[in-house]
Amino acid sequence: MRLQASSVVLTGATGGMGQAIVDALCAAGARVLVVGRQLGMLDEIQQRHPGQVESLHADLRRAEDRAGIVAAARRLTGFNVLINAAGVNHFGLFESMDDAGIADLIDTNLTATLQLTRSLLPLLKAAPQGCVVNIGSTLGSIGYPGFSTYCASKFALRGFSEALRRELADTRVGVLYLAPRATRTEMNSARVEAMNRVLQVAMDSPELVAVELVRALDRDLREVHLGWPERLLVRLNGLLPRLLDGALRRRLPTIQRFARPTHKTPVQSEQKS
């Protein structure tokens, strides 16, 4: 994929990872339509990359806003890449979540992403070479206590990416699933960061994730898992899940301690669109 000749639609552009991805795409020569819910940040991103970036204020959960994204993509010259980076996260015990919180997370991370991808597929298939990029997570391969609903959405996104890739095998559209490990963005509450320090969970910068995304696009890769030993753990969980059952059981008291706050914590943004 030659990014210098590409026009990209990026959702979740106003989050920490989204902004890093914009910077990396622009450095590679791409033109980018940034989509998000934070008006001030959209303007700031556009001013940072004059001539390369257009912005669109939209909420992916709204059908009329998704239609607006499709209309804007039609106006782009050479649109050929969709990067689905919008999403929300929730850290806490599953039993503490209410129906509205579950529905909002699944709607944002999964349903709206699938609906937008379906709507943009005809445009991507018309391009000389197209690509759908789904930003997943290590927690799309390893079920982790405290993130049950988030894991559900990312496991589903990984399965969708695999199935869609096979469904489009006779077209010029590729599908890339990129799975970062824990990343230093606003998706992580203070409780999550404190827990990661206690458990010695490594965290990457959003800039590193963006560099790896550009590299994966340049090499036409299909599925990329970031971080070590996370890549090994993903393989072990697929082959010998009981090994990770035991390891996570030993961590469970620490996870429960951080997942049971003394007050309710709102849903945290991952790459909030």
Image: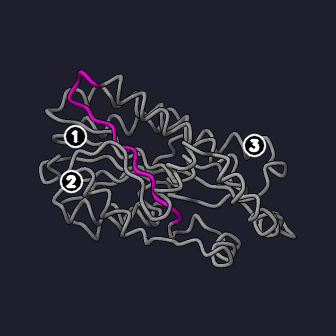
The answer to which image quadrant residue 163 occupies is top left
- Left or right, 126 with reference to 239: left
Which kind of residue does numbered mark 3 sit on? Ala
Q: Residue placed at 51% from the left, 52% from the top?
A: 137
Residues packed near mark 2 inside 10 Å, few (<14), some (14 to 19) or many (20 plus): many
Classify 10 Å Cα crowding around label 1: few (below 14), some (14-19), many (20 and above): many
* Magenta segment includes 178: yes
Q: Earlier in the sequence, mark 3 or mark 1?
A: 1
1 in relation to 89, above or below: above
In the displayed structure, would residue 66 be above or below residue 97?
A: above
What is the number of the mark on residue 100? 3
User: How far is disc 2 from disc 3 in space, using C-alphas?
Assistant: 37 Å
Left of 224 or right of it: where is 62? Answer: right
Q: Which residues are magenta?
A: 169-182
Q: Position of residue 24 (x, y in %)?
A: 27, 64
Q: Which mark is residue 79?
A: 1
Compute the Cα span from label 2 to label 1: 9 Å
> Looking at the image, is mark 2 or mark 1 earlier in the sequence?
2
For mark 3, does the 10 Å Cα neighbourhood hold few (<14), some (14 to 19), or many (20 or more) residues? few
User: What is the CA distance from the residue labelled 3 to the residue labelled 1?
Assistant: 35 Å
> What residue do we see at 24% from left, 27% from top?
125
Q: Which residue is mark 2?
A: 31
Check residue 262 for magenta coloring: no
Q: Are marks 2 and 3 in contact (CB under 8 Å)?
A: no
- SS for dot 1: strand
